[in-house]
Image (spheres, rainbow, N blue to C red):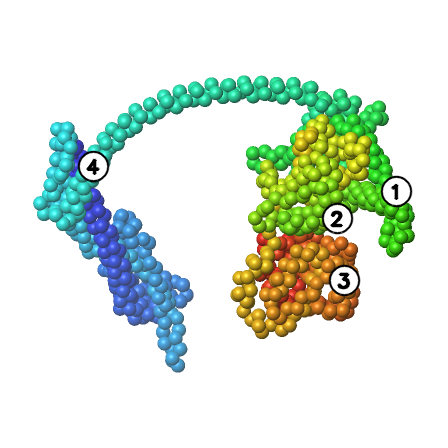
Amino acid sequence: MRVRLTDRLTLRQLRYTLVIALGLGLLLSAVQVARDYSQHVDSTMASANRMLDAFHYAAVQAAYTLDSDLAGDVVRGLVADGPIISARIISDLGDRLAGIHVGEQIEATPVAFLFGQPVVQRRELTKTQPGGRQETIGFLEVEISAVRTSGPFLERVALNLLSVLIETVVLAGVLALIYLRTTTRPITTIVSRLQAAEDEGTLVKDLPVPRGHDKDEIGFLVKAFNGLLRSVETELRARRQAEDDLRKANDVLEIRVEERTAHLNQEIAERRAIEEALRQSEERFRDLAEVSSDWFWETDEHGRFTLVSDRFFGVSGLSRHQIIGRTVGDLLTGTIIADISDGWDVLQHMMEQRSPLVRYDMTLRGNDGRMIFARMDGKPVFDITGQFIGYRGTGRDVTQRKIVEARLDEARSEAERANAAKSHFLANMSHELRTPMNAILGFAQLLRAAPGQGLTQTQKSYVQHILDAGDHLLRLINEILDLARIEAGRIELSIESVDIVDLVKECSDMLDPLAAGQDITVTIEDHDGPLHVMGDRSRLKQILLNLGSNAIKYNRHGGSVRIGFGVSPTPGLQRILVCDTGIGIPQDMLRKVFEPFNRIGADRTAIEGTGIGLTVTRQLVEHMNGAIGVESTVGEGSTFWFDLPVSSPLPKPKDLDSQRSQPQDGTLSHPPLRVLYVEDNPANRDLMRDVMDLRPNVTLVMAENGKTGLSMALSENPDLILLDMNLPDIDGLKIARQLRTDLQMRDTPIVAVSAGAMARDIERARSAGIDDYICKPFDVSEMLTLLDTVATGSYSPGTLRENGTGNTLGAPGL
């Protein structure tokens, strides 16, 4: 071992043991000495008091008799032996009868310091007089010192200290031997083993537990140390493995760093390319800004202009210091801005809400007094934290545009005034022409129908010429009025689902007499089943009759007219064709066919015509969201076609068989219900009749126009009124308003059944007092539900459900 002697654990334990044992022994000795000291002092005082008690009587006799010799014997007796070192007797007159002091040598010894100053005690000497009265005759004073009797006490102290020293040495030796055997030697063995391993440069894997220390602290220490050694070994292995892994990871990291460096170099090159492209883009933007008619502007978060491009100052003539640093409100106050579209309050609110500024027109006043009209657009700008930092936008000089718009408005107003004057003129002319025309045609018909031989054959031909010319003039008046109404936008259409096949057959029957007069054959292309389109039925009939009559009039004698159905190139449209074998139309004249009053050369023939029928036809088709056109070959004939939107077919009676065979629950128990249906379309009336047949408790009465419907509503007292909105004579809304003013009809449910599905149509119906609104084509089950709820009294306005074919007044969002 390389441990110095002075650093040995045994020597240190011996030192600590000696010091602790000696200190403990001295402490116990001090306690014992203090106790002996106290007992010695107490015994000294007790001994002195006994001596005083013994000589008290003699002292009283000496003081009473004033016997100096007796007094001397008393004081000498007191100091002869014991703790009293001084004594004296004093008479009651203050005279000292005797006194002695023997403490000079004792007070000079070191022991006197230990016991302190002598204690002075004075005892009164009294004599009992006759009558029992005590009389003081003198005093006995003594000085008591424990030093005089301290010999035995000091001997005991010395013996006590000596025994403590001996006990300390013996105890230290015994403890040192115990420490050596129980602690030092096992630890020395362990340290020697570790030191040997250190000298040999090997790793200690397991230390043996010293004998006899398997279950004590040394054994647990060795076992814990062995566990620590094993942990260290495991950790060393893990550290070596981690170092190997770290070395491998470092190699991989170096490879990745090299790859990342190469990638960064590539990104740097790409970024430089992007920066160069950005620089070129900025230069291009700057060049465009310089040559553009627009200018650019920016504001700060307070709305003050911080940037305005030079283009603005070149256009307005204002200087930069008049604009920069000011808000729009400042410019309004400073009269630089004369006016703002929508007002400054609206613009200020939009800016406070950080909303985009779209198409705000401003009127600026230049330094020379001229007015400049500018259009401003802007958007709010926010930083990366979402904090508003201002507005950024563009401006444009629209002065010339404003001038042009003002001229256009003036021209439009003038055209509207002219159109209104034209409409007023046509209306007046219609009235003025129809009045004499009524007399001309009426009397001509009376002449033609005169009985007997009232007119010669020549005169009859004259009358026929009058009638033909009158009919032609009447058609001309009607077509002109139609064209005027269309151009004025006052035409009203009832758009609904129409079976075009049935309508074509109906029009063919009407064209047959005209065709027969020229030996022309009218044929209709066969088609399986109906074809439904969206349109106004009466106007569709007018279109078909116009195209059919033209095909007959401009045909050759003995020719033919074919009305057929084709496929439109536009999805969702159905094409109807009217083909003739007439004279045809030159290609260069086709584009003029639909121009008003242009008969394409037919005005030089004997064929009657007005030149506006095709114009009205085109306007009607386009108002029904359709298209019209013509194809023609000179000498072979022409084909006029028009396309209309396809609609869902109306349910036919044959479609209602399943409803008839499966009556709704509770139908037989429903009370009687009387329903009035006001509708001008025959097909719709037939459909409603078949629907009502599904309910035996329902009695249906129908009216084909508004006046009849209003009269029947008041006379029939129906339980439910179904009302079409577009009637030929009275608007459905007017009928509803009139019925709601009648006390009898105030609570009767009125349900609109119309093709108008716009929200404004439904809202107008609500305002007129109509309870619900069903859109055509309607769902049969919905109609039956309505009948059942009204019959059972459970109906309430606005409760019809919303579906794909109809809306109700109670539906949300209407």
Q: Given contact means CB atoms under 8 Å apart, are the residues at marks 1 and 4 in contact?
A: no
On screen, residue 278 above or below 776: above
Observer-nearest of 566 and 621? 566
Disc 2/disc 1 C-alpha distance (Å): 21 Å
N-terminal-most mark, 2 or 3? 2
Disc 3 target residue = 708
Residue 810 visible, this orientation = no
Residue underneath mark 1: 425
**Up-down relation of residue 314 to residue 798 (above or below):** above
Q: Earlier in the sequence, mark 1 or mark 3?
A: 1
Q: Position of residue 446 (x, y in %)?
A: 88, 53
* Residue beneath the point at 76% across and 23% down: 315
Judged left or right of residue 748, residue 456 is right
Q: Earlier in the sequence, mark 2 or mark 1?
A: 1
Nearest the viewer among 494 and 562 is 562
- Badge nearest the viewer, 2 or 3: 3
Residues at badges 2 and 1 in contact (C-beta under 8 Å)?
no
Question: In what element is the residue under mark 3?
Answer: helix
